[in-house]
Amino acid sequence: MTRLILAVVCLLPAAFGLNPQRRMSQYAHRQWSQAEGLPQDTIRALAQSRDGYLWIGTEEGLARFDGIEFTVYTRDAGQLPNNLVTALWASRDGSVWIGTAGGLARYHAGRFTLFGAKEGVPSAFITSIHEDSRGTIWVAAGLSLCRYRDGKFTNFGQEHGLPAQGVRAAIVDASGRVWVAGFGSIGYFENDRFHETNEGGSLSGGITLCLALDSAGQLMAGGTNGMLLNEGGRRRLLTTADGLPATFVRALVHDRDGSVWIGTNSGLCRRANGRTDSVSEAVFRAGEWVWCLYEDRDGNLWVGTNSGLHLFRDQSFAVFGKNEGLPSDQPTAVMQSRDGAIWVGFHDGGAGRLAESRYTPVQGLPSNEVFCLRESGDGEVLVGTRAGLTRISGGRVSGTYEPSDTVGRHNVFDAIEVAPGTLWLGTNGGVLELSDGKASNAIAGGPLLNDAVVALLAARDGSRWAGTFGSGLWRWRNGRAELITVEQGLSSNQIRSLAEDDDGTLWIGTAGGGLAFFRENRFWRCSAVNGLPSDNVAHVTDDGSGWLWLATTRGLARVEKAKVKELVHNPAARLPVVVFGISEGLKSMNCAPGWPASSGGGRSRDGRLWFPTVAGLAAVRPERIHTEAPPPPAQVVEVRVDGVDVVPTAFAILPPNSHRVEFRYAAVRLAAPESVRYRYKLEGLDAQWIEAGSRRVANYNTLPSGSYRFVVRASDSRGALFGETASFAFRRTPHLWETAWFRWSLAAFAALLVWLISRWRILQERHRFSLVLAERARLAREIHDTLAQGYVGISSQLEAVSMLLPEDPSQAAQYLNLAQKMAQHSLTEARRSVMDLRDQALEGQTLAQAMAQTSRMMTAGRGLSATVQAAPDLPLVSKETEQQLLRIAQEALNNALKHSEATHATIALQREGNALKLRITDDGSGFDANNAFLSAGGHFGLLGMQERAQRAGGTLRLETAPGAGTTIEVTVPLT
């Protein structure tokens, strides 16, 4: 038999702090080191400030901890006089005093103040800080006791009667005495003078390193020779002979439940009820130095060691495993027999009986893998194992039965008594009925694991239910069995547990379908959609107080039974489900071990609930669920605008170019920060609260100008709010274009712009009309100056012809020839007048592109190929100049087509100095250049080109000779 601490008091949650009746292994334990954000692993000092933060002194700086994140402060940032932090004290005014190896510092309202020799602080290691009832700060600093009062430091040393040769510890008792200790005896300071005492007793001869007060106000001391305390009405010195891990004691705490916690050079121990218990080496490595101890306001114990920061906390659930005397950490079934004993079955440790704080294993089981524990009407314990059914009577095996199927499986997953002497067994082959040693098949199974029956229930109405591993739920009544599946409304075919309510409601735990229930002759469902942590429910337990407890793969869920039944009227309703996990004491969130295990957990007659988990057997009293005191309300701890810190306690005015605003907030719950939930909104932007869950940061990008107020609230996982909202108000100033006067000005400017555009269009139309009139006038002038004059000349020549023809026909022929040439010239001038209109080829194109397009159109199918060559750096010229140059090129090509019999022509555009040069060359027959530009020569086209060059402000040069082709070069100066 194995001794097991299992007294009722062991399951009571601590009223205030760490329950002294629990084993050290039953406390929840966590550890943090540099890997989690500490500046260094050696923790020398601890304190909790009024706002809930834990302050941690290390050998490489100071850290502030909110349960999740560490904020680090160092000397390099100007926040500390030295990075070796040796003492901490959180004063009642909200300040944190920091003692270091090189001076003193105070943190208050977000700012650090350093004190050194200039301010009167001794240049020595500061090893202890304490505060009296009047707010005076007392500092142990080397050879002096230093007092800070009314903004002034005063030092008291051996010249003032200090009994110790060097002060290592100081503490203030309820009467206002300041106790001091170090090298030598222990004394106290009162009425501005020291008094020597014999309190040190047997500690003398060594160094006293720490002082503490017990619940009666009596002084406790620890040092190099052990630990001194009052116990049993007398003064005692505790050493390794009394169970201390080491005689060298560095830290002491007397907690609110009366236990004394002792930190030594070889680990941590607890002194309670005259007994010393040490923390196992599984938590602290051998030889671990404990530098400091601190009990926070929730009763949790914080321990600073060489390997980091440790937390020990009490919880609602007590978990039992190998450390508490059980054979395994993997229970699968638990039940209370009628004699009051608690029976436990294990995945790998057989089964046994808990009674009178002792665990007694059952000997002779055919298998150590237990699936179920039941009790028959005559008090026999029925144990279903992988190797069959075992009956236990009087603590001994009284019989076994080994079922078998075609593939040799002998599993008994569940067993119930359906009539006196008659059992139903859930097996791989279905349901076997065992009566008087004879077995018959009550419900047929199949060869697959899904067909195995893993849960059985005999209902009050005489029907029987059998749940399979994956094929649905059997209902047996009046000798007939009916298989119910998802097609008939069942939430899942994978059944894991069955339970019946007082009113006949059937509760069904399923894998993948949540909690199903059969009510009013219909199946209903409660799942993750309704608030369950998981759709995998391994067991259902009724605590007798109106609550259902569900063992799931994601923790234990508690839900009000009446609320679940209301899903009949509103299947999509969200239920208030409470989930218990690591924070409440479970060693694992998986509370569905060893599937297919059917009997699972249960309720004992004293009201305790028992749950197998994958990391031990958990037990709890529902009426005494441990609830922590709520943490301080949420606070806005950091505001950053575009990566720059903004003081979160004052109204802020943000510049117009502010883009990203980040808010960090927290409600400090040191031991269980994961249980805190947040909601926030930005007043002025958000209409509704935003549920942030456990997320502690909110970001807003590109806010419009205006006034805003960020508010945040915190609640626990059950929805209870903590205090008032925290807020941060600010205003984002507008850009110039966001101001009202700018918008009015912009509107006025827009109106003016509309008027100006309208006016411009009217003027443009007028200008176009004037251009039309001007063109008409030009055409009239052209007709008068050219065509009309030409027609008059032609008429005169024809009159001369008519007069001379009878008398001198040869002279008349000359006048007639001249009239013909004048008619041709007039036709050319008419064409030129028309061509002076803007050519469409120039619309949307450059001059070179227009020449290329025109040349292609003119030479198509004519036996003349034309090439346009344009330099890439052609300057821009006026539209009028482009028009004249294009017409010159057209006329030159036209002449080549009509007169020169050319096969190739080249049009070249290039810049030469400050001029634009157009050169048209063909390989035609050429002609005599003499008198080429005289009207008498009949070359009216050349005359027109020369006039166009002159209109563009340029000159035209002609190179030609008979049989040598023709080159026309136009040079237009650039202005």
Image (tube, rainbow, N blue to C red):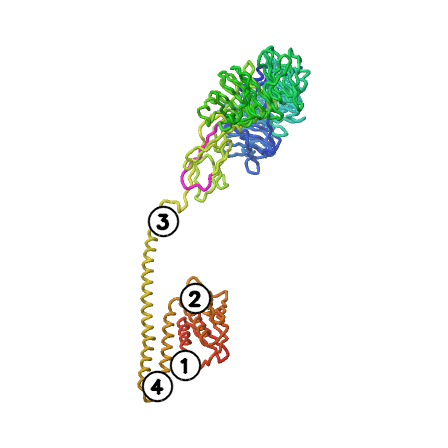
| Magenta residue span | 700-715
SS label for mark 2: loop
**Tag 3–tag 4 contact (CB < 8 Å):** no
Left or right of 267? Residue 551 is left
Main SS, magenta residues: strand
Residue 937: give its label: 1
Q: Nearer the viewer, mark 4 or mark 1?
A: 4
Crowding at dot 2, Cα within 10 Å, few <14 / some 14-19 / many 20+, comes out as some
Residue 172 in magenta stretch: no
Crowding at dot 1, Cα within 10 Å, few <14 / some 14-19 / many 20+, comes out as few
Q: Nearer the viewer, mark 3 or mark 4?
A: 4
Q: CA distance from mark 1 to mark 2?
A: 33 Å
Q: Earlier in the sequence, mark 1 or mark 2?
A: 2
What residue does disc 2 label?
877
Crowding at dot 3, Cα within 10 Å, few <14 / some 14-19 / many 20+, comes out as few
Q: Nearer the viewer, mark 3 or mark 1?
A: 1
**788 is higher (above) or lower (below) than 332:** below
> Residue 960 at x, y = what percent?
48, 78
Residue 746: give its label: 3
